[in-house]
Structures are given as structure tokens and as C-alpha cells.
Amino acid sequence: MQAAKKIMKVFVTRRLPQEGMKILSAAPECEVSVWDSDEPVPREELLKGVQKAHGLVCLLPDKIDAEVLDAAGPNLKVISTMSVGFDHMALDEIKKRGIRVGYTPDVLTDATAELTVALLLATARRLPEGVEEVKNGGWSSWKPLWLCGYGLSGSTVGVIGLGRIGLAIAQRLMPFGVKRLLYSGRTAKPHAAEVKGEFVPMDTLVSQSDFIVVSCSLTPETQGLCDKAFFSKMKKTAVFINSSRGAVVNQEDLFEALSSGQIAAAGLDVTTPEPLPTNHPLLTLKNCVVLPHIGSATYSTRGVMSALVARNLLGGLQDTEMPSELTF
Ligand code: NDP
Ligand code: DGY
């Protein structure tokens, strides 16, 4: 007689796209419970839901810290996050407990790079302002300097963090006629050759770039990296774009730089906090374009991400290979 398979308890902190849910519900060894909502699971429900779980599927807004891990208890063997960023997880605590982590690199690179380029163009060419002027009657005539912005042709672009997404952004920007592509990070990247990228010290990148794109991961080193000193070194005509994490930027310093004319404009897909309160000073500025963290938001990308999340989880539960396991 075959031994009965051990049933594994899985807690999923959000309603996922069907691609991922189908895979999880077809796994006979899993007893899946889902926080069945499009909104984040309240903390107390997370702490309750994770109890005795063997697997946890989480999203960016779920802070996975010692309290959650303690609430889960010793059964927990895998955490699968529907994100490539992992700054919402206390990796030291996770490592101590020998828990494996799955994440979603690569599958969202194209979508995020595409959105970053869209945000850069929208910010530099003042698209939201233009749309608003058409609607509110501000469009009186064609005027030589009205709604002028900055173009990429002949420009210098600086990418902070030429990783998967940073490279994909650079690849998309080069065909616009970018003259020089600078990048900064901890290490020079062989793949930079594809975009003729020049590895330069951060100060050089900041002072020479016409467009600065932040696409690094959030770490203790990058937290608050873009502050008063950073903005004061930028050209007055330069445009700042961030699609990494809000905490890389000191938002008070950014507000000051934008409102005083220290820099030309900023486009942010990520902020602190998220959502950004509707009365936040940054939202009063015409030269600041803020998007609600939609870098990877295409239907197909989110579907593929959720399927990868499910496969990572199953690999961890079955003690087999996970398609995208985080090594830390
Ligand atoms: P990668 O790991 O491929 O790239 C991260 C980059 O950050 C690396 O090039 C790394 O450079 C760089 N970096 C790390 N530390 C520093 C530092 N101190 N200074 C400068 N650069 C540094 O990750 P991805 O490209 O896949 O993703 C990057 C980030 O984008 C994610 O961590 C996430 O926060 C964000 N993201 C945002 C999305 C959105 O919706 N807006 C969607 C997806 C991701 P080095 O190797 O030299 O250290
Ligand atoms: C990530 O994956 O880290 C993004 O911020 C959301 O896709």
C-alpha cells in the first residue's frame, strides 16, 4: 500500500491571477487558504493565516519579519513572493530558520523597463501637464515655448543599477539617439557593452547626466541615496526617474529640488509610503509625475509572475528545484 502523501498547508496573502491559482489548486499535496481579496491582508489576519503553514505566498506590501515567521512556526519551509524585489522580507531571520525563498526575476523585466521609458518620456515631455491643459481650456494657441521639455536625442543618460531592469531600460533608450550611457553600481557589468555603458563613480553620473534613472535594488546602502547632496549635483535641466523603490529617495529633498528649480522634473513609479497620501507636497508640483507602482502591470506579465510564484512554492514544498530561488 502506498503511504499517504503529507498534506502541506499553504497561506496565500492575496487573490492571485488565475495562472498561479490554477497551479496551486491542482497540487494534491497542498491545502491552500487564500486571503480572498484584491486588498492587502490585515496584519492580524496574516499572523493568523500563516499559523502552522508549510508555505507562504506573499506580495510586496506584506512585511515578512520575525513576528510573521514566529507566528508561522517551525513548519514553514518556503516563502514565495510575487516580486523581484525582496526588501519587504527580513532575510536574516528567514535564513536563521532555514526557510527557502522564491521570487520573480526576469519575467517582469521587459514590462518594467517599458513603463520606466514611458514615465521618462511623459515626465521629460510634460505629457500629464499637456493632457490637463487640453481638458481645462489652457490650450489657447501654438506657442513657441509653451510646454517645452527635454529630449533624449544627443543626451547623456545615467542609470543607477545596471542590473536586469537597468540594462533593459538602457537598451530601449539607446535607439532614441542617446549619446552617452553612464552607469553606477557596486561592480562593472560585462553586459554594459551591449549599450556602450561607461562605468563611472556616482558623482560623475549625477553631475553629467541629462536623465538619471534609478533601477537599483533597495539595500541599506541605497536607502536615501538620492538626497539633498545628490540633487544639488544634478544639472538644473536634468530629469530624475525612479522605478526601483521609494526609499532610495529622500522625498523632502526631492520636493525642495523640484520646487526650487534645482532640477527640471521627476517621474516616480514608487514612493514612500505607498499609496502616497493625496495631500502629499510632491503631488502639488507640475514637474513631478507620480505613478502608482505599475512597473510590471501588464496582464501577461502578472499572469506569468503568478505562475512562477506557484511553481517556486511547489518546488520548495517538495524539496526540489525552485525555478527562481533567491540565494542569500
Ligand atoms: P537586479 O538585481 O538585476 O539589479 C539590481 C541592481 O542594483 C544591480 O545592478 C546592482 O548593481 C544595483 N545595486 C545594488 N546596490 C547598489 C548600490 N549601492 N549602488 C548602485 N547600484 C546598486 O534586479 P532587477 O533589475 O531585476 O530589479 C531591480 C529593482 O527594481 C528591484 O529590486 C525592485 O526594487 C525594482 N522593481 C520595481 C518594479 C516596479 O514596478 N516599479 C518592478 C520590478 C522591480 P551591483 O550588482 O553592482 O551591486
Ligand atoms: C517587484 O517585483 O519588485 C515590483 O516592485 C513589482 O512587480
Image: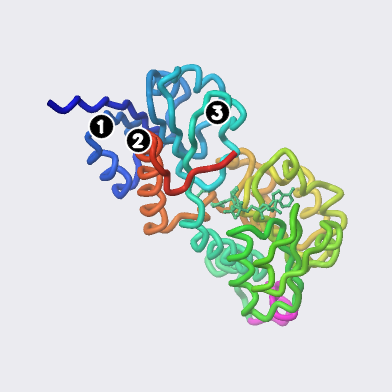
Question: Of callouts 1 and 2, which one flags the residue occurring earlier in the amino acid sequence?
Answer: 1
Looking at the rendered structure, the secondary structure element under dot 3 is helix
Question: Of callouts 1 and 3, which one flags the residue occurring earlier in the amino acid sequence?
Answer: 1
Q: Which residue is mark 1?
A: 29
Q: Which residue is mark 2?
A: 318
User: Taking 276 as reference, is 202 left or right?
Assistant: right
Residue at point 56% right, 21% down? 66
How many numbered marks does the figure carry?
Answer: 3
Tell me the number on the disc at residue 219: none
Looking at the rendered structure, the secondary structure element under dot 2 is loop
Residue 136 rendering spot, x and y as whole percentages:
56, 64
Q: Dividing the image into 4 quarters, which one contains the C terminus? A: top right
**Residue 276 magenta-highlighted:** no
Residue type at mark 2 is Gln
Q: Is ligand 1 within 8 Å of the beta carbon of the residue shown at mark 3?
A: no
Residue 316 rendering spot, x and y as whole percentages:
40, 36
Graded by Cα atoms within 10 Å as few (under 14), some (14 to 19) or many (20 or more), the crowding at tag 3 reads many
Residue type at mark 1 is Glu
Graded by Cα atoms within 10 Å as few (under 14), some (14 to 19) or many (20 or more), the crowding at tag 2 reads few
Decide whether the magenta segment is chiefly helix, strand or loop.
Answer: loop
The part of the chain drawn in magenta is 142-154
Q: Residue furthest left?
A: 1
* Mark pair 2, 3: CA separation: 18 Å
* Mark pair 1, 2: CA separation: 9 Å
Question: Of callouts 2 and 3, which one flags the residue occurring earlier in the amino acid sequence?
Answer: 3
Query: Quarter-wise, where is residue 152 in the image?
Result: bottom right
Q: Which residue is mark 3?
A: 94
Residue type at mark 3 is Ile
Kindly indicate whether the residue at mark 2 contacts the one at mark 1 (C-beta within 8 angstroms).
yes
User: Taking 63 as reference, is 288 left or right?
Assistant: right
